[in-house]
Image: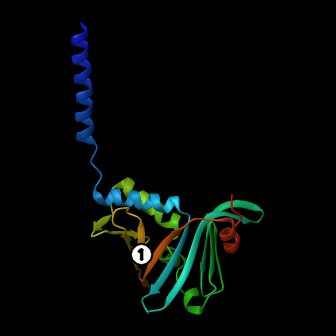
Amino acid sequence: MTVATAAVVVAAVFGLGFVVQRATLRTPSQATLAAIHSAAWLERYRLVDSTITLGNGRVMHGRCLQDWVVQAGRRRRGAVLRLDDGYVLLAVPPHTLSATGGTAATKGMSPLVLMELAGCPRVLARRLQTLAQERRGLNLANDRLSFDLKGTRLTLTLAPGTGAPVGIALVAPTARGASRIRFTPVTTQLRQLLGVSGR
């Protein structure tokens, strides 16, 4: 086989591989790409500050941190959500979900709904990653990305240009609300304030 013939065969094989790949692998939709970018923002920043407005007009401020938590002398990955009414939620998979403080109205709300509205990073990132991988359940229109999470309809408002989530709208069977969220760098002082150990 001459060098020219070998080059033609190699080019044909690569060309056929490209055609097969294009035929079998679908191009990701804009909604899928938006979910991937949103999840990347949520994974990159583990601390989110939020201003939450509930359906009844009540406004709360929250801060949710995903970090190492010391529990029974062991360090585990978890989330701490603090609201300005004194409510503190500790969520450490697989079995710990404990809440203290807060008003009767806050205590009566689903912890998952509160974590979603507060923009707790890993809660949202994992769902977005799953839906993006499965390429289903995502809708994108006018910089708003909608999806479902355990019976709750969530819509993320995305910043034009960066795709960073900047707002959340939530409709659940027992609650509805919206929030503005902001990513905040994690410092040792903030870890101590939120009651976690850090790395």
- Taking the image as shown, residue 95 lies to the left or right of residue 16, namely right
Report the side of 139 relative to 104 (left or right): left
Instruction: Choose top left, top right, bottom left or bottom right for residue 98.
Output: bottom right
Residue type for callout 1:
Ile
The N terminus lies in quadrant: top left
Mark 1 neighbour class, 10 Å CA radius: few under 14, some 14 to 19, many 20 or more? many
Q: Residue furthest right?
A: 73
Residue 104 % position (x, y): 59, 92
Q: Residue furthest top?
A: 1
Q: Is residue 148 left or right of residue 140?
A: right
Residue 25's image quarter?
top left
Residue positioned 42% across, 71% down in the render: 166
Seen in the picture, residue 80 relative to 44 is either above or below; the reply is: below
**Percent x, y of residue 85:** 60, 88
Please tell me which residue lies in front, 196 or 105. Answer: 196
Residue at 38% over, 60% down: 35
Q: Quadrant of the C terminus?
A: bottom right
Residue that badge 1 annotates:
168
- In this view of the protein, which residue sits in the foreground, 113 or 83? 83
In the displayed structure, 31 sits above or below 189; it is: above
Percent x, y of residue 64: 57, 72
Q: State whether residue 137 is above or below residue 63.
A: above
Q: Tell me which residue sits at (40%, 57%) in the image.
A: 36
> Whole-percent x and y of residue 80?
62, 72
Query: In the image shown, does 46 or 87 lie closer to the viewer?
Result: 46
Find residue 90 and report its image quarter.
bottom right
Picture mark count: 1
Q: Residue at x 27, y 27 (%)?
A: 14
Q: Secondary structure at mark 1?
A: strand
